Amino acid sequence: MRFSQDRLHIVATIQSAAKIYKNELVGRKFLYVFDGRFIEVIFKAQNFKHLTGVISPLPASEFFRKAIRNQLSVNQISFSSDHPYELCCKKIKHICDIATLAGSECFMLEKITTKSRSYKFGTTDLRFSICFDQPRNEQWDILNETFLAESLRDEDCFSKSESAYSVTCILSKPNDQKKYNNLLFCEPSCSICAIPEAVRELMSDKLLNEVYGLE
């Protein structure tokens, strides 16, 4: 009985998280400044299923769609030795907080290596981590420079990364806009001089004026 109740809780949490993920992450691009560098990250609908840690016979797009509509059922999720129930429970604790981590104070981790694969970057708030990598084709060639959020880890991942940096600035924008128009986070000590010129060129005039008083 307890296991059935836990499965109901997992489904309910996944459905709540899917709505947050859709409303606050999908369709937007996020830019992270760290160590004098920056990367751009997107959160795709088809990656949500993997972030939950569950197995489902539903294709990723349908899984996400059903979760948003509160149509996901307990018989549409399962677990295995590669996706154990215990690990899913750990991930579910954080699944609703992905959007918060995406736009708030965090660390940028570089070259994260796990048992299953490696990721070029990831962010952590010391409670959990989101790992990023660039999209690739079947031959493993990089398709473009924008990173995808691909894995949720119930750990800070510091021990699995080669380097860690404080994120000094986070910007966001809708995918259909050319310039970043929203400042989500900025270290109090961060100045216009600390932001790479390439990033300033990606910021809208309105945002530059509001944040730095520039013409």
Image (cartoon, rainbow, N blue to C red):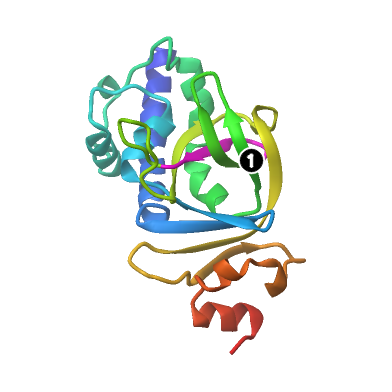
Which amino acid type corresponds to the residue marked 1 in the rendered image? Leu
x and y, in percent, of residue 4 in the image: 37, 17
Asked if residue 61 lies left or right of residue 19, the reply is left
Residue shown at 41% from the left, 47% from the top: 43
In terms of image quadrants, where is residue 169? bottom right
Position of residue 27 relative to residue 16, above or below, is: below
Residue shown at 59% from the left, 32% from the top: 112
Position of residue 161 relative to residue 144, above or below, is: above
Which residue is disc 1 drawn over? 109
Residue shown at 51% from the left, 69% from the top: 182
Position of residue 97 relative to residue 35, above or below, is: above
Task: Say if residue 161 shows up in the picture.
Answer: yes
Task: Locate the C terminus by quadrant.
Answer: bottom right
x and y, in percent, of residue 81 in the image: 43, 9
Q: Residues within 10 Å of mark 1 (few under 14, many from 20)?
A: many
Task: Locate the N terminus by quadrant.
Answer: top left
Q: Is residue 120 magenta?
A: no
In the image, 176 versus 68, the foreground residue is 176
In the image, 99 versus 47, the foreground residue is 47
In the image, 193 versus 45, the foreground residue is 193
In terms of image quadrants, where is residue 162? top right
Residue shown at 56% from the left, 67% from the top: 198
Specify the segment rendered in magenta.
Answer: 125-134
Asked if residue 58 lies left or right of residue 162, the reply is left
x and y, in percent, of residue 49 in the image: 35, 33
Which residue is situated farthest in the right direction here? 189
Which residue is situated farthest in the bottom direction here? 215
Is label 1 in a helix, a strand or a loop?
Answer: strand
Asked if residue 8 lies left or right of residue 96, the reply is left
Q: How many marks?
A: 1
x and y, in percent, of residue 59 in the image: 23, 31
